[in-house]
Image: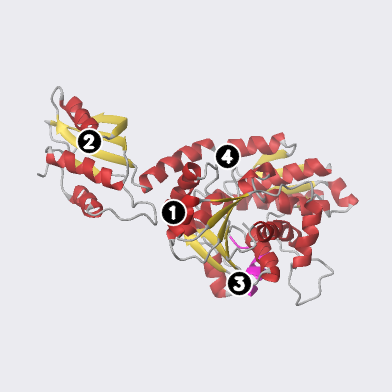
Amino acid sequence: MTGSPTRPPDRPAGQPPVTVDDVRAAAALLTGVATVTPVEESRALSAIAGTPVLLKCENLQRSGSFKIRGAYVRMARLSAAERARGVVAASAGNHAQGVALAARLLGIDAVVHMPADAALPKVAATREYGAEVRLHGASVDEALAAALAESRRTGAVLIHPFDHPDVVAGQGTIGLEVLEQVPDVRTVVVPVGGGGLAAGVVTAIGALAPHVRVVGVQAAAAAAYPRSLAAGEPLPAPGTTTMADGIAVGTPGLVPFTVLHEAGTEVRTVSEDDLSRALLLVAERAKLLVEPSGAAAVAAIMADPGGWEGPVVAVLSGGNVDPLVLLRVVRHGLASAGRYLQLRVRVDDTPGSLAGLLAGLAASGGNVVHVSHLRTGIDLPLHQAEVDVQLETKGPEHCAQVVGDLRAAGYGVAVGAVLRPVAGAQPVKGVASTISTAISRPFGAA
């Protein structure tokens, strides 16, 4: 995402773009508007990290994410003339809903540009808050370009999702709340897209509790910040294809980048597998629904067990997840945790062979959720058929047992979806070698 960074006209040169006083003023504006979201300890995550871990539940915020904080502060400070012209924004979902809700609360007309493939629930929610939604382009960058063009054409004020001091100050109110709710906090882990949330938290905590470490987290598939911070200037991400659409930002904003760079903030990356496992853990063990980007902080903690000074607070930045995306991510998370197994098995093409295979899988304790039967193929012997089977299992050790039982029964097996177990869990002896053998051994081998 790109855009025109701004700085308050009365801010002296050399002064930080955002100060803790700006954050405190934003907190006053948000009184009665933004919810002071709860902080909940996670025993499961604490066990993985080896230190107390608490979850700052911005997924329970109004509009489903932290975005209402920055959007409202920015819009509340518009002049009467600016409000009369209306506002325009671009977003894949969370900022869209934050702007729409803030506009409704302030009585301002809002137009939000969203990518053509934006999640339908997010589009619907933005419209229900009262904003006009225009679908444009294949990415948030293209939607933002359309919003900028409309702002120049109509005079509507562009409400940037992260690159404005008021927006950063609004997001920084989360840092004030964390310090009040967890006075002994030592580390705060924050998802990073354009950087507005992380910059706001760094501003607040850096001024009031400089001993507390703030760590940002990006999806590795859309990580602009690590290379930008190393280069000393905002650089575009190599790509933005990630399940974590809420933090899939092309280029850091100048305002947040300046804050994070001057503070020496560390920004880590997490894989798609890390994100899916984190989302699954938060849903199963914390009983909280978050979107993939909202689980990024948890993913970083799980990816480096024992590497954090506690107490640690992980910010769950949002919960606006498309049910279809949730379904795919949960299945991927189950596979990553070794609880979902996909097999391709060759059987004799004779009556009863499929029933015999399914009976064997039942005896091994695997729960079959899908079966596909192929009798004709270029490399398939005339007397054999291929069966694709998807199973629910009890974990990596059980996956290895299922594969081993099939091999022992004489079946040719290829494994398609067994990934490493949850970070921090004890490795299961023999699982990796069993899976490797199952993949590399040719069909029909003894």
The three-letter amino acid code for the residue at tag 1 is Asp
In primary-sequence order, the first of circles 1 and 4 is 4
Q: Does residue 402 appear left or right of residue 23 in this picture?
A: left
For marks 2 and 3, give the one nearer the viewer.
Answer: 2
The three-letter amino acid code for the residue at tag 4 is Ala
Q: Badge 3: how crowded within 10 Å, few (<14), some, or many (20+)? A: some
Report, in whole angstroms, how far the alpha carbon at label 4 lies from the one at label 3: 32 Å
The label number, if any, that marks residue 274 in the structure image: 1
Element at label 3: loop
Q: Badge 2: how crowded within 10 Å, few (<14), some, or many (20+)? A: some
Q: Which residues are magenta?
A: 251-264
How is the structure coloured here?
A: secondary structure
Task: Provide residue 399's location: percent of width, then percent of height.
Answer: 27, 43
In primary-sequence order, the first of circles 4 and 3 is 4
Residue found 56% across the figure and 50% down from its top: 294
The residue that label 3 is drawn on is: 233
Looking at the picture, does residue 92 appear above or below residue 353? below
The three-letter amino acid code for the residue at tag 3 is Glu
The residue that label 2 is drawn on is: 364
For the residue pair 396 and 18, the one nearer the viewer reads as 396
Was residue 55 drawn as part of the magenta stretch in this picture? no
Report, in whole angstroms, how far the alpha carbon at label 2 lies from the one at label 4: 39 Å
For marks 2 and 4, give the one nearer the viewer.
Answer: 2
Q: Which residue is at the far left?
A: 446
In primary-sequence order, the first of circles 1 and 3 is 3
Element at label 1: helix
The residue that label 4 is drawn on is: 119
Residue found 39% across the figure and 57% down from its top: 424
For marks 2 and 1, give the one nearer the viewer.
Answer: 2
